[in-house]
Image (cartoon, rainbow, N blue to C red):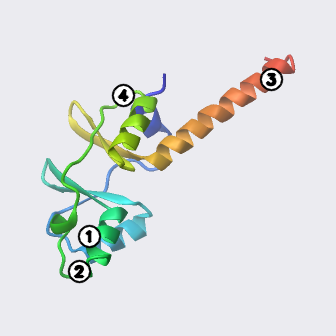
């Protein structure tokens, strides 16, 4: 069974973008725009304090009419962060994401933060796996496998 480690290996970009808790929402949103990502981890040093997502922007900044220039990420971030281990099976992580209603999960290993995967990463990985299966079965049926 494929694992979170396999999903991380299939991603084009490695690493995790983090911001400090006192970063402004405006600066955090610009960073997400520039990096074309939907979530940032919030940390001060080695400790993970939360996650700041597009959903946080919509629900806690825009809908509440807060000023993104003066609102700090720490005021609107999600504090309960669901994390997974790299050995976790992909189907289990999909179930966790559905159950917890999250789209991004940090991956934490023995030495700390390894990366982050999104539901988009999981879907792309599954699509690639399915494509390989179809190719193999097509070759098999045609007698070339």
Tell me residue 113's x, y (percent).
Answer: 25, 42
Where does label 1 land, which residue?
60
Q: Work out whether mark 2 precedes mark 3 in sequence or the reverse, and give the earlier one.
A: 2
Who's the residue at 41% across and 60% down the image? 37
Nearest the viewer among 18 and 98 is: 98
Who's the residue at 30% across and 32% down the image? 85
Identify the mark at residue 88; answer none if there is no mark: 4
Element type where label 2 sits in the image: loop
Nearest the viewer among 38 and 94 is: 94
Say if residue 11 shows up in the picture.
no
Q: Are the residues at dot 2 and dot 3 in contact (C-beta closer than 8 Å)? A: no
Above-or-below relation of 28 to 5: below
Q: Are the residues at dot 4 and dot 2 in contact (C-beta closer than 8 Å)? A: no
Nearest the viewer among 141 and 99 is: 99
Above-or-below relation of 33 to 114: below
Element type where label 1 sits in the image: helix
Q: Are the residues at dot 1 and dot 3 in contact (C-beta closer than 8 Å)? A: no
Q: Work out whether mark 1 precedes mark 3 in sequence or the reverse, and give the earlier one.
A: 1
CA distance separating discs 1 and 4: 31 Å
């Amino acid at each position: 069974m494929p694992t979170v480690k396999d999903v991380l290996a299939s991603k084009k970009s490695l690493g995790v973008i983090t911001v400090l808790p006192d970063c402004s929402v405006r600066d955090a949103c610009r960073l997400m725009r520039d990096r074309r990502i939907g979530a940032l981890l919030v940390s001060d040093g080695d400790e993970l304090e939360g996650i700041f997502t597009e959903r946080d922007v919509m629900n806690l900044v825009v809908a509440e009419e807060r000023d993104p220039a003066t609102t700090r990420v720490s005021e609107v971030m999600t504090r309960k962060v669901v994390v997974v281990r790299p050995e976790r099976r992909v189907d289990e992580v999909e179930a966790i994401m559905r159950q917890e209603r999250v789209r991004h999960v940090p991956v934490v290993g023995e030495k700390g933060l390894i990366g982050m995967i999104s539901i988009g990463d999981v879907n792309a990985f599954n699509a690639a796996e399915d494509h390989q299966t179809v190719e193999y079965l097509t070759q098999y049926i045609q007698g070339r496998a």
